[in-house]
Amino acid sequence: MRIATWNINSVRLRQDMVKRFMQEYQPDVLCLQETKTPDEFFPRNAFAELGYTHQHIHGMKSYNGVAILSRLPLSNCSIARWAGKDDCRHIHATLPDDTEVHCMYVPAGGDIPDIEQNEKFAHKLQLLDETSNWWKGQSAHHTRKILVGDLNIAPLEHDVWSHKQLLDVVSHTPIEVEKLLNLQQSNGWHDAVRHFVPHDQKLYSWWSYRAGDWEASNRGRRLDHIWVTAPLVPSLKSTRILREARGWGPKPSDHVPVMVDFHS
DNA sequence: ATGGTAGCGTAGCTA
């Protein structure tokens, strides 16, 4: 079983790129973030034609939007709402083996890492607190769950190109890292990507559009994650971050797909 | 300290 997550930054603009990824990498389940379209305009048929006939989507005009596209049947398709908003950031569904799949898009949080000055940063921290409390309340570490998505936080020193230079930059501040680790502990989540990659090795899933040459400067961050609960850890087989997709032209997403394979 | 690019939708917000 292969699961993948990708912040696609407009699924309509890049539907051919999604199809290319499906055909070349054959994920069983593909979770998308920043689809940026209301559900009536989501290109369902393009993906159904490739076998992804099971689709749980939740989008809105212009911003945000999440989708789970699957070759495996989905049940219990649900929408989760946080911080008093319905801004299309979290959906979940259940696979035939009872594994619960969560697709999340955590707010980027604006530029200023101060909840007094920046309500977008406050929203980000609130969402992390609410989701942590939600999972704590379920106390179900023993059930099979996968959490994937653009969590917009790079928690480890080597999840960013310069730990020191990014300590004050939203996505890598100590308060965000603390909230993300609290979320990780809330349900006994294991980082399925770092399970395979040593913590002293640089690892990125996002490179800014604003860098002149993303490849040469290589100032990336690991914002996209795949986490699993304890029962799935023994089944972890391998991981891959598809760096080359950052160059898929002519208009790539600024994020690349992250994949995890499981022994079936 | 600043600005750089991108998508949506056609101004300005969000990233």
Image (spheres, coloured by chain):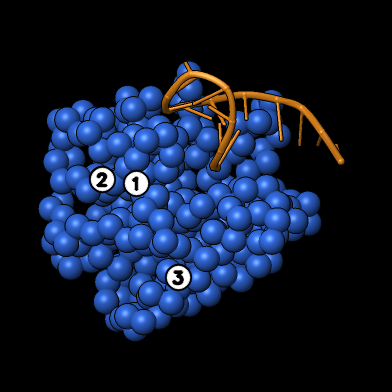
Residue highlighted by disc 3: A130
How many angstroms separate mark 1 from mark 2 (CA)? 6 Å
The span from disc 3 to disc 1 (Cα, nearest Å) is 19 Å
State which tag comes first along the sequence, 1 or 2. 2
Give the drawing colour for chain A: blue
Q: Give me the chain letter of mark 3.
A: A
For label 2, count other residues whose C-alpha is less than 10 Å away and answer few (under 14), some (14-19) or many (20+). Answer: many
Looking at the figure, which quarter contains the C terminus of chain A? bottom left
Give the alpha-carbon distance from disc 2 to disc 3, as whole Å.
Answer: 22 Å
Q: Chain of mark 1?
A: A
Q: Is residue A206 left or right of residue A56?
A: right
Residue visible at 71% across and 34% down in the picture? A217
Q: Is residue A118 visible?
A: yes
Residue at position x 67%, y 47% from top? A111
The residue labelled by disc 1 is A66
Q: Position of residue A152 (x, y in %)?
A: 54, 52
